[in-house]
Amino acid sequence: MTSEWPLWEVFIRGQHGLSHRHVGSLHAPDAAMAINNARDVYTRRNEGVSIWVVRSSDIAASAPGEKGPLFDPSNSKVYRHPTFYEVPEEAGNM
Amino acid sequence: MYAQMVRSDAASVRSIEEMEPRERAFQQRIDEGQKIEPKDWMPEGYRRTLIRQISQHAHSEIVGQLPEGNWITRAPTLERKAILLAKVQDEAGHGLYLYCAAETLGISRDEMYDQLHSGRAKYSSIFNYPTLSWADIGCIGWLVDGAAIMNQVPLQRCSYGPYARAMVRICKEESFHQRQGYDILVTMCRKGSDQQRAMVQNALDRWWWPSLMMFGPPDTDSVHSAQSMAWKIKQNSNDELRQKFVDETVPQAKYLGLVIPDPELAWNEERGAHDFGEPDWNEFLAVLNGNGPCNRERLGARRAAWADGAWYREGLMAHAHKRVAGVAAE
């Protein structure tokens, strides 16, 4: 019988209050086992305080070919960065 | 190395001008140091070569648990036992990171296991030697993990994103492996009895040459390297890494008061490096082709573990299906 366990993506929140971050993937029969396995595979050295798992097949991703249309438009919008603006020295720290 | 003699899927390295536009764009991205990600277009040869290399690397991590597992129940102290358990558990983790990286290239986990269990896929020749005494566990950490680290550090810069990221994690965890091995030997050689020192020398005599073979055949015979280097899935030549390994290991052996079993080993002032003898490449090929001292035992243990675990894998999957069906029925 071939019934490979489904693939899960694992996200871990580290100690310092940052967002959950993708760390890798693993196979598990269900969510509870995926969390158990994630603990053993991805947090053997105190890497996290919280684990999320999600079925890989449930993730929708942008295609590499869409990179241009998706991300190029923001290139020209330099005014979105604070460094675009010059603050007069007399105005002090801003 | 953990991936020795990986066959590269290209007749010869082609120049940028000879490539079709898609491939040229791909090679230019690699030359610029960009990472290739799973959904990006890639030449079939790149994909297949990487699958072979990453899966061979993963198989090595998994099979590599067996020689050390032999000593978990026989470790001399509770602390040594806990350390060895942690190390062997790390190897399992490393195998899993790597299998996942290979899966992003379109091969399934079951296919890879099948390739290993049927003998079609290779794993590092080093794991086909027996671990006869506790000093062997020290030598494996010191020499085998030491050689592995030497190869893996540059692989963190590999062109394929998922492989490079797996290597970053692995390298971070691996450095304790080498140190714990050396620590075993320091204890035996510097604080131990004559009998214990003899035990370590005996282990070094057996592990030295197989460790040098880990880096693969000499550059003159390494026909697959050029393409893999152009693709940046291999960064240094076999001989380069082997030389670096010898140069780093010699003073460490000296500190332990051990004699490296190579009469040709000598410092070459002119080169600023050690000269050393040639490993027995016939032995290397024999081991790689399944005829080392422990090949049958290792594969037998892997096959048995996989077959004996089938009821568990299937049972958990059936349970998961049943729970989903139960929720749907409510």
Image: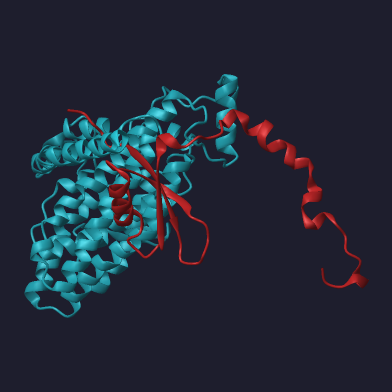
Chain colours: A red, B cyan
Question: How many numbered tags mark residues here?
Answer: 0
Residue B177 in the figure: left or right of residue B271: left
Closest to the observer: B192 or B137? Answer: B137
Residue shown at 6% from the left, 73% from the top: B195
Above or below, B17 against A89 in this view is above
Closest to the observer: B191 or B295? Answer: B295
Q: Quadrant of the C terminus of chain B?
A: top left
| Residue B113 pos. (x, y %) | 22, 35
Q: Quick check: can you spot residue B1? A: no
Residue A22 in the figure: left or right of residue B304: right
Closest to the observer: A30 or B17? Answer: A30
Residue shown at 32% from the left, 46% from the top: A31
Residue shown at 10% from the left, 69% from the top: B198
Residue A67 in the figure: left or right of residue B199: right
Q: Residue furthest front?
A: B330
Above or below, B1 against B8 in this view is below
Residue B191 in the figure: left or right of residue B222: left
| Residue B269 pos. (x, y %) | 40, 62
| Residue B186 pos. (x, y %) | 22, 74
| Residue A94 pos. (x, y %) | 82, 68
Residue shown at 63% from the left, 33% from the top: A67
